[in-house]
Image (tube, grey):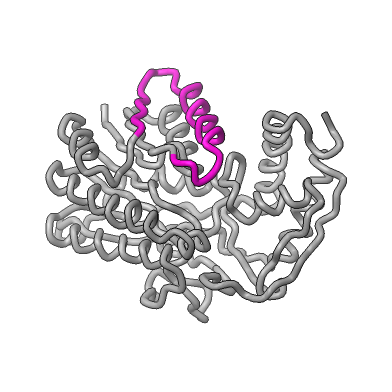
Amino acid sequence: MKKVLLTGVAGFIGAFLAKKLVETSSVQVVGIDNMNDYYDVRLKRSRLEMVAEADKRGVFEFIEGDISDSALINRVFEGGDIDAVVNLAAQAGVRYSIENPDAYIQSNIIGFYNILESCRRYPVDHLVYASSSSVYGSNDKVPYSVDDKTDDPVSLYAATKKSNELMASAYSSLYSIPATGLRFFTVYGPMGRPDMAYFKFAEKIVQDEPIQIYNMGDMWRDFTYVDDIVECLARIIDAPPVSKGGARRHRVYNIGNSSPVLLTSFVDMLERILIDEGVTDNRAVRELLPMQPGDVYRTFADVGNLEADFGFRPATSLEDGLREFARWYRAYRIATSGTCGGLS
């Protein structure tokens, strides 16, 4: 039975990927997460409980630890017979990188270096790692293609993700590590991160507080539903890149819905769905503000190479995805605060 090491397993994408793997694949999953308090740890524990409940074959193992701990990562690889690695552990958040840059260097640079070094010492069939649409910076050309330049990041977070791509490419070339980087575009869905815009907007609407929308509302985002992200990951894990000559190589894909939405229109839709699903009767109160440092005007994914290589492209509509989020969010609010809107 193959063994997959999944870092960031208590994170949003990591937990849903772990759930899919233990339910549908004949693999063992070793998950690592440091369970930090960047946001409510209870949500991370709930995700792990979801994975444990799905693990009917007893193939999931959880290790609490940090990928920046080189000794820990070395021990996991040394005794683990790891076949594939999916590195989703990272310090996330663009604005938080301005306030706390050290966290990004420790997790996104040193932590990823430790993963690469262990993949060198203990060769794996495939290293899959999370990059981000943030690497495109303030590019004017859309949709963003993986062939576009990515050497002008506008946040430290984006710079660390671009660094990951460069590091993986170098290790792939030097040590024949098959590696695939995935540039995620604004992932959303149930059990997501509370610091993400859609989650914060929902909270503000329920609490009848103003929603802050930057660049005076003129911003576009390519929202991608978490199930689509997980489906792509599951397909890619077992398909390491191989050149025509047989040598292993490094490649990068965008994973996005290829359908950017104006943020003010997004708020309108979220407001309507929260009301439809009985979350709240409140209307969104909008506060339009100037562009903030580290933000980009628009994200828009070209997924042509993903579709060509794997016959799949994200396609969940924003309407359907937000309804799934709203249904989960209603239960989450009741469980964590005892109320949801005017309901008890």
Camera-side residue of 54 and 284: 284
Residue 255 placed where, x, y %?
Answer: 47, 57
Residue 39 is inside the magenta segment:
yes
Q: Is residue 274 left or right of residue 140?
A: right
Q: How many marks?
A: 0
Camera-side residue of 187 and 341: 341
Q: Which residue appears at 55% of the width and 57% of the height? A: 186
Residue 253 placed where, x, y %?
Answer: 39, 60
Q: Is residue 64 left or right of residue 121?
A: right
Quadrant of the frame with the N terminus: top left
Q: Which residue appears at 55% of the width and 68% of the height? A: 299
Q: Is residue 190 left or right of residue 275?
A: left
Magenta residues span 36-64
Q: Is residue 261 left or right of residue 122?
A: right
> Would you identify the image quadrant in which residue 259 lies?
bottom right
Q: Is residue 91 visible?
A: yes
Q: Check the image and report above or below for 29 versus 181.
A: above
Q: Which residue appears at 32% of the width and 49% of the height? A: 128
Camera-side residue of 207 and 115: 207
Q: Which residue appears at 49% of the width and 24% of the height? A: 54
Residue 110 placed where, x, y %?
Answer: 27, 54
Residue 216 placed where, x, y %?
Answer: 71, 75
Residue 50 is inside the magenta segment:
yes
Quadrant of the frame with the C terminus: top right
